[in-house]
Amino acid sequence: MVGQKIFCANCRHCIVLRQYEAEQDKYILRVRCIKKMWSKRSGEEKLYKYFTVARRMMNRCEHYKKMGDDLPFTKILKKELPIKDEIYSVKKPVLKINK
C-alpha cells in the first residue's frame, strides 16, 4: 500500500486482550499486534490502550491483512470506542442449587 496509511485496527493481527489489575477480578483492555510490529526502543513489545486503537497507523506493514473497507470501519470504531480506559470486572458464575 504505497502512499496510503494502514489502519492497524483493521488488520486481523491487531487483537484485544485483557490486562489484569492487582485485583484478579478487574482488568483493562489493551491491543497488541500478534506479528510484533509495535515495539519499544528496548525491543520490548508495545501494548496500546484499547480506546486509542483507531489512531494506530503505519506507513507500511509486511504482515497487514485487511479485514474490510477502512472508511466505514474506522468511522464506526471511533464512534463506538470508549473515550478513556475503563475498568472491567470478571463476572463470577452463579451457582444454581436444585431442590
Image (tube, helix red, strand yellow):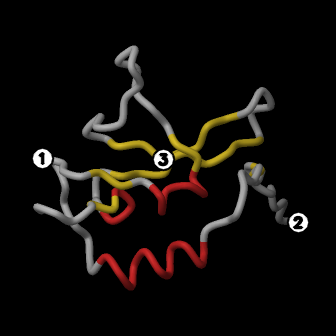
Tell me the residue at 77%/49% (across/down): 87
Which residue in the structure is indicated by mark 1? 62
Which residue in the structure is indicated by mark 2? 99
Number of marks in the rendered image? 3
Nearest to N terminus: mark 2 or mark 1: 1
Nearest to N terminus: mark 2 or mark 3: 3
In this view, the residue in front, 95 or 2, is 2
Q: From the viewer's perspective, is residue 55 above or below residue 67? A: above
Secondary structure category for the residue under label 1 = loop
* Residues at circles 2 and 3 in contact by the CB criterion of under 8 Å: no
* Residues at circles 3 and 1 in contact by the CB criterion of under 8 Å: no
Which residue in the structure is indicated by mark 3? 31
Q: Where is residue 66 in the image (x, y as percent from the top left)?
A: 22, 66
The CA distance from mark 2 to mark 1 is 60 Å
Q: Where is residue 29 in the image (x, y as percent from the top left)?
A: 61, 48
Q: Sort mark 2 into few (<14), some (14-19) or many (20+) by Cα contacts within 10 Å.
A: few
- Residue type, label 3: Val
Tell me the residue at 45%/32% (across/down): 46
